[in-house]
């Protein structure tokens, strides 16, 4: 039997179109996407037609599906100040290193007593950490103190930022620098949990709240 | 490129000097590897839904010893939400056998669809929506400024004819229900939205409905 002749073609393929496509997609994703932040909980927010973007100086309270509460503050300076005040109030000591780590963290959700341990964890461990969130019941309302000191700290940083902007000759709007309060609630969470947080805000006379929602097309 | 070098670049041919015939092709494999690595990275780490915020002003809490007389709302509607269900009644709440001799309040049910809630709100808040349409036209034809538009719209929203809405939730309502409702109210250009506590008598009425 004669041997089957394999045609001697070069095994190379022209990859240029593939490379073109790959880089096109890379460019698209780089420009279009914003990064997923490393939050300890995933929250699926409801949608609304609102088109207001998230302001700069914010205190964010996250409520997950089970009603656990997490807090985040936007500026690192303010976070440090908030933690120092809380540390003094609850007599929980933090090392210099822990305060630094706390300033760089994303949302946190644990009681004041658990916090030093919580700071030491890695991002993955925090997701696994079995916590009840920040206690916000009437007998032990740590959330109220977080909001109280967070507000003061955010006001201070907002003030310094405003003064900086004024010195730079800009004409800043003072309201842009005041802390805003944002609630990020999971759509499946029972409203009662959110109401508890809202009432805590209202106890502190902070009545202007914002809900994070995903954008939705407005009906015609 | 993934190819096998054929015949080498240039060899000596009978001692004659020849310019080296280097292949003009570049090996693109590492570049492709890198491109796809980056692509995978960006695909996995990115989120697309840009979050937005919806602001809502809550009524201030009364001071401990302060007694606020129940306000008389002229053009009010109260929404009661339970798990994926929504009820409403217009005007004030009357219990059966009230001293004013008014008929007891009955709850009506509606839904979150465009034929339910949206139509209801559009009908009840028609004056504001009509005024807004006029304003929109003026804004488009540049007869008024943006700031004037905002101010006038807010004036309409706070006017006497505008619908005022109270929202009450029971313990089964989810945040999605609540935000969906507020969203519908914003679509219907309602200026006064007040989330308040559920009364016992209202809760009983809701239970009877379910």
Image (cartoon, coloured by chain):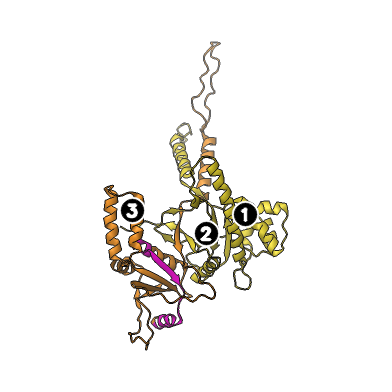
> In the image, which residues are magenta?
B185-208
Is residue B83 in view from this perspective?
no
Q: Magenta includes B188? A: yes
Pointer 3: residues within 10 angstroms few (<14), some, or many (20+)? Answer: some
**For residue A49, which quarter of the picture?**
bottom left
The location of residue B50, given as percent across then percent down, is 46, 52
Find disc 2 in the rendering and name its residue: A181
Label 1 SS: helix
Could you tell me how far apart the alpha carbons at marks 1 and 2 are, in whole angstroms? Answer: 15 Å
The residue shown at (48%, 60%) is: A210
Q: In this view, does B162 lie above or below A51?
A: below
Label 3 SS: helix
The residue shown at (53%, 17%) is: B20
Find disc 3 in the rendering and name its residue: B149
Q: Which one is in front, B172 or A138?
A: A138
Point out the frontmost of discs 1 and 3: 3
Marking on residue A79: 1
Is residue A100 in view from this perspective?
yes
Q: Check the residue under mark 3 and report the chain it is in.
A: B
Q: Which one is in front, B195 or B72?
A: B72
The location of residue A71, given as percent across then percent down, is 58, 60
The answer to whether the residue labelled 1 contacts the one labelled 2, judged by CB atoms less than 8 Å apart, is no
């Amino acid at each position: 039997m004669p041997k089957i002749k394999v045609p001697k073609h070069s095994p190379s393929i022209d990859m240029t179109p593939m490379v073109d496509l790959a880089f096109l997609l890379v460019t698209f994703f780089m420009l279009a996407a914003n990064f997923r932040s490393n939050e300890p909980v995933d929250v699926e927010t409801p949608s609304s037609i609102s088109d207001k973007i998230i302001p700069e100086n914010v205190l964010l309270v996250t409520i997950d599906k089970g009603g656990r509460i997490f807090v985040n503050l936007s500026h690192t300076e303010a976070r440090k100040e908030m933690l120092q005040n809380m540390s003094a109030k609850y007599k929980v000591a933090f090392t210099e290193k822990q305060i630094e780590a706390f300033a760089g963290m994303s949302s946190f959700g644990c009681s004041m007593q658990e916090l030093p341990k919580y700071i030491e964890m890695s991002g993955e461990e925090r997701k696994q950490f079995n916590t009840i969130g920040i206690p916000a019941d009437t007998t032990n309302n740590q959330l109220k103190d977080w909001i109280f000191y967070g507000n003061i700290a955010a006001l201070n940083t907002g003030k310094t930022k405003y003064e900086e902007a004024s010195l730079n000759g800009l004409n800043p709007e003072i309201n842009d620098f005041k802390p805003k309060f944002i609630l990020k609630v999971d759509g499946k969470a029972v409203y009662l949990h959110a109401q508890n947080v809202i009432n805590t805000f209202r106890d502190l006379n902070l009545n202007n709240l914002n809900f994070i929602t995903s954008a939705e097309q407005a009906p015609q | 490129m993934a190819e096998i070098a054929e015949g080498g670049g240039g060899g000596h041919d009978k001692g004659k000097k020849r310019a080296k015939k280097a292949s003009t092709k570049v090996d693109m494999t590492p570049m492709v590897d890198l491109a796809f690595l980056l692509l995978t990275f960006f695909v996995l780490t990115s989120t697309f839904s840009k979050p937005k915020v919806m602001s809502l002003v809550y009524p201030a809490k009364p001071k401990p010893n302060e007694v606020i007389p129940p306000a008389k709302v002229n053009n009010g509607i109260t929404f009661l939400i339970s798990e994926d269900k929504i009820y409403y009644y217009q005007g004030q709440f009357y219990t059966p056998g009230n001293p004013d001799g008014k008929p007891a309040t009955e709850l009506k049910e509606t839904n979150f669809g465009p034929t339910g809630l949206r139509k209801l709100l559009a009908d009840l808040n028609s004056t504001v929506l009509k005024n807004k349409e006029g304003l929109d036209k003026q804004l488009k034809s540049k007869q008024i400024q943006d700031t004037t538009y905002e101010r006038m719209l807010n004036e309409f929203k706070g006017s006497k004819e505008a619908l005022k809405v109270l929202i009450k939730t029971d313990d089964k309502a989810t945040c999605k229900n609540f935000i969906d409702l507020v969203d519908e109210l914003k679509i219907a250009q309602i200026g006064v939205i007040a989330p308040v506590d559920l009364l016992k008598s209202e809760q009983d009425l809701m239970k009877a409905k379910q």
